Amino acid sequence: MFWNRISGIYDFVENTFNGKANRDITQYVANLIDSNDIVLECGCGTGMFSIEIAKRCKSITATDFAEKMLHQAQKKCKDCNNISFAKADITKLEYADESFDKVVAGNIIHLVDSPKIAMGELMRVCKKVGKVIIPTYIMKSKKISSTAASFFNILGANFKEEFNFETYQKFFKSMGYNVEKYYIAEGRMPCCAAIIEKK
C-alpha cells in the first residue's frame, strides 16, 4: 500500500513542500476542540492533527487504514495520555451512532472510492449539535495541481478528486450538507477546512 510505503518520509515531504499551510490548518482545527470533547479522527496519517487535538480534548481516538502510518502517529504522540489508535475503514466505522462530540477527517476525503458513504459514516458517529471537520487540500492553480498531484500519483497515491474551492463547495452541496463555515489555510497547496454542525 502506498501510504505504508511512504510513512517514514511523509512528514518530511509534507513539511518541506507545504509546512506553512499545515501549521495553520492544524492550529485552526485544534482551536475548534473543547476540553470536554470526545474526538474521533479518521485518516490520522502520521498524527499531524492528532497531536494538536490531543492537547485540547478530553480524549481522541485516532484511526487510519495504513498500519505504518498509525505506527508513525503513535511515535509522534507518545507523550499524550488521552489518545488511542486503531486501524479503521472510514466507510465502515465500527462505532455506535452519536459516539463523538467532534469528528475530524483530514486530507482523506479526496482519496476514498466512496466519499458519499464516508460522509454518511462521519455524520452517523457524530453527536447531535456536534461538528464534523473536514480539512482537505485544494488546488489554487493548474500548475501546482499538476505538479503536486502528478508527484503523488506517480508514487501511487491515486487521488480520486482534485478540488479547488468552488468544486469543494459543490462536493458538499451535491450530497445535501450545509457547511457552517469554510476556512482556508494558505500555502503552496492551500488546505480548506469545511465545518458541518450536525443538527
Image (cartoon, rainbow, N blue to C red):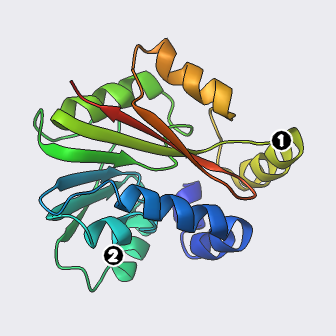
| Res. 8 image quadrant | bottom right
Left or right, 112 with respect to 47, comes to right
- Between residues 110 and 30, which one lies in front from this camera angle? 30
* Residue 141, numbered circle: 1
* Residue 177, numbered circle: none
Query: Which residue was labeled with disc 2?
Result: 74
Amino acid type, label 1: Ser
Crowding at mark 2 (Cα within 10 Å: few <14, some 14-19, many 20+): many
Q: Quadrant of the N terminus?
A: bottom right
Q: Which residue sits furthest bottom?
A: 79
Which residue is found at the position 33% from the left and 53% from the top?
Answer: 32
| Res. 66 image quadrant | bottom left
**x, y percentage for residue 77?**
33, 78
Amino acid type, label 2: Gln
Which residue is found at the position 17% from the left and 79% from the top?
Answer: 81
- Between residues 133 and 148, which one lies in front from this camera angle? 133
- Between residues 32 and 99, which one lies in front from this camera angle? 32
**x, y percentage for residue 124?**
21, 29
Crowding at mark 1 (Cα within 10 Å: few <14, some 14-19, many 20+): few
